[in-house]
Structure formats: C-alpha cells, structure tokens
Image (cartoon, helix red, strand yellow):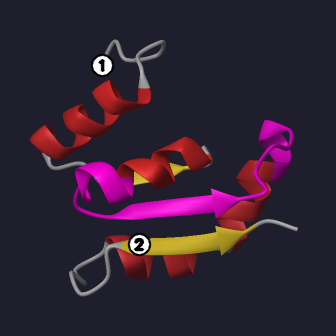
Amino acid sequence: MGLDNSPDTTIWRYARRHGYDVLIKDEDFLRLVLSEGFPLRVGAVQNAQVPVVKLAEFLLTRLPQLREFLGAQTEFGMLLLRLG
C-alpha cells in the first residue's frame, strides 16, 4: 500500500476510505478515534512495546476474540487488549 512511513492520520484516512479495520499498538491512533471517528473497527493492544515474536504470540492466543470482534458483529467499534 506504500504507507510504511506515512503519518498516522494518512493511514487512518486510508483505512476509513477503503473500509479497513485497524489493529494498532500505537496509542497515537487512539487519539484519532476521538478526533476522526472510527474506521470500521479498531483493535488496540496496550503495552505492546515488546519484540515482534512476543506480540505475535499474544495475538495468536487472542485470535478467537479478534475473529469474533472483526467478524460479522458491528455493535462495537473498539476492542482493547492488554499485553502483560
């Protein structure tokens, strides 16, 4: 998508424009929820400043919860997961 070094607002607006859900570990994106509104849905991982392997393991253990949240449900716009 070519957004690797883009500002958060650019990524946010791209996700909204293209109907993407967002999984984040950057708390700056949480501020965008207040100022810009939701893309479809936002999954936020707190305390995620860990090695990628540990973050991947954590997300894999939460996969059923993530699938339910990102599946057909449209009632909730944010899922907050806390690592550690």
Q: Is residue 72 left or right of residue 82?
A: left
The kind of residue tagged 1 is: Met
Q: Is residue 62 left or right of residue 28?
A: right
Residue that numbered label 1 is attached to: 1
Question: Local crowd at mark 2 within 10 Å, few (<14), some, or many (≥20)?
Answer: many
Measured as percent of width and height from the top left, residue 64 is found at 54, 80
The kind of residue tagged 2 is: Met
- Quarter of the picture containing the N terminus is top left
Measured as percent of width and height from the top left, residue 23 is found at 48, 52
Q: Residue at x 60, y 49 (%)?
A: 27
The quadrant holding residue 39 is bottom left
Q: Which residues are magenta?
A: 33-54
Measured as percent of width and height from the top left, residue 18 is found at 13, 40
Secondary element type, mark 2: strand
1 or 2: tag closer to the N-terminus: 1
Q: Residue at x 79, y 57 (%)?
A: 47
Residues 61 and 44: in front is 44
